[in-house]
Image (cartoon, rainbow, N blue to C red):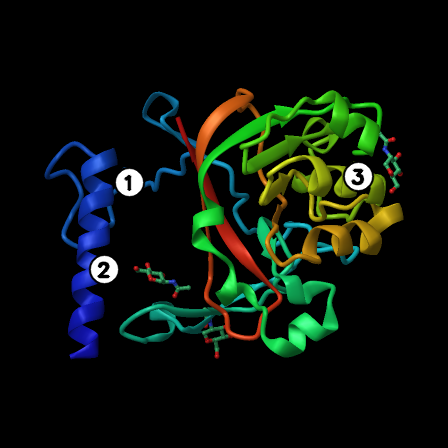
Amino acid sequence: MKHLVLLLLCTQVIRSSSNEVCPSGYSDEDGNSECLKPIRKEVYEGGEIIDITHRFTPNTPSGAPDGIGEYIRLLLSMKNGSDYNFSEFKLAVHTGTHVDAPGHMYDNYFDAGFDVDTLDLRVLNGPGLLIDVPRDKNLTAKVMKSLNIPRGIQRVIFRTSNTDRKLMWKKEFDLSYSGFMKDGAQWLVDNTDIKLVGIDYLSVAAFDDLVPAHLVFLKSREIILVEGLKLDNVQPGLYNVHCLPLRILGAEGSPIRCILIK
Ligand SMILES: *[C@@H]1O[C@H](CO)[C@@H](O)[C@H](O)[C@H]1NC(C)=O
Ligand SMILES: *[C@@H]1O[C@H](CO)[C@@H](O)[C@H](O)[C@H]1NC(C)=O
Ligand SMILES: *[C@@H]1O[C@H](CO)[C@@H](O)[C@H](O)[C@H]1NC(C)=O
């Protein structure tokens, strides 16, 4: 039964992808045709859906010096006579595009169970602004004030020099990334209605204020931090933001899939 389901799934995947890339009836029964090439999209249909998630590769930065390395491997392989391919992956939960839960920096919240499974999907999904911040400064209170983010806006994705510098595309962890200073985080908490803070490197907090700025954001357990977003070539403006973390019980972070819809 299990085999049958898998087999059906496989056939379907092959059929739908071959429909997209091959002239109909072109690929052979085994799907071995030359034209069987998967499509990987960043933007769908005239920009209506923009994928702002980085794909995982061995070079995805993790905070360690060397990227995530060989994070996926086949446990069962067709090349080795199995009926199907069957992989497992192993990742630190704060690698690539990911979300932080309150338990990330508050031990009492961790113990009490404020994990990624408790994050509010209403916060993670809804209208939000993508804005460019000044490139020559970290995100201080002064910078935040200058952005004039209106009351009522609940989701903001901040694009910084991290995007210009393509930091998420480099496997080495770069400590000079831009991020929030403690006073910038506090300013947002005190003067805006923002509940989702998105940023374009592995941490919303600049390295010099790594812990203090996280603590300010996570204290109320109402603000959700989405980090490592892919914001290259996206117009600033208002979008519908959709982010979905995995439901990993007991995890203070999770890989997350985020898209913008116009
Ligand atoms: C995985 O499955 C595909 C068929 O879907 C097969 O062509 C390929 O060789 C398999 N890969 C490995 C490493 O076994
Ligand atoms: C297949 O088996 C060989 C020999 O045991 C092993 O070296 C190889 O890594 C296996 N390949 C996969 C994809 O599991
Ligand atoms: C932001 O702060 C980091 C240290 O946390 C520093 O290396 C970097 O130069 C600062 N960036 C800007 C644009 O001032």
Judging by the rendered image, the residue that carries numbered circle 1 is 34
Q: Which mark is residue 10?
A: 2
x 67%, y 41%: residue: 168
In the picture provided, is 204 more to the left or to the right than 50? right
> Counting residues from the N terminus, which is met first, the one under dot 2 or under dot 3?
2
SS for callout 2: helix
How far apart, in angstroms, are the residues tagged by discs 2 and 3? 42 Å
**What amino acid type should be assigned to the residue bearing mark 1?**
Glu
Image coords of residue 226 (percent x, y) = 60, 47
**What amino acid type should be assigned to the residue bearing mark 3?**
Tyr
- Mark 2 vs ligand 1: CB below 8 Å: yes
How far apart, in angstroms, are the residues tagged by discs 1 and 3? 42 Å
**What amino acid type should be assigned to the residue bearing mark 2?**
Cys
Depth order, front residue of 134/18: 134
Residue 16 visible here: yes
> The N terminus is located in which quarter?
bottom left
- Mark 1 vs ligand 1: CB below 8 Å: no
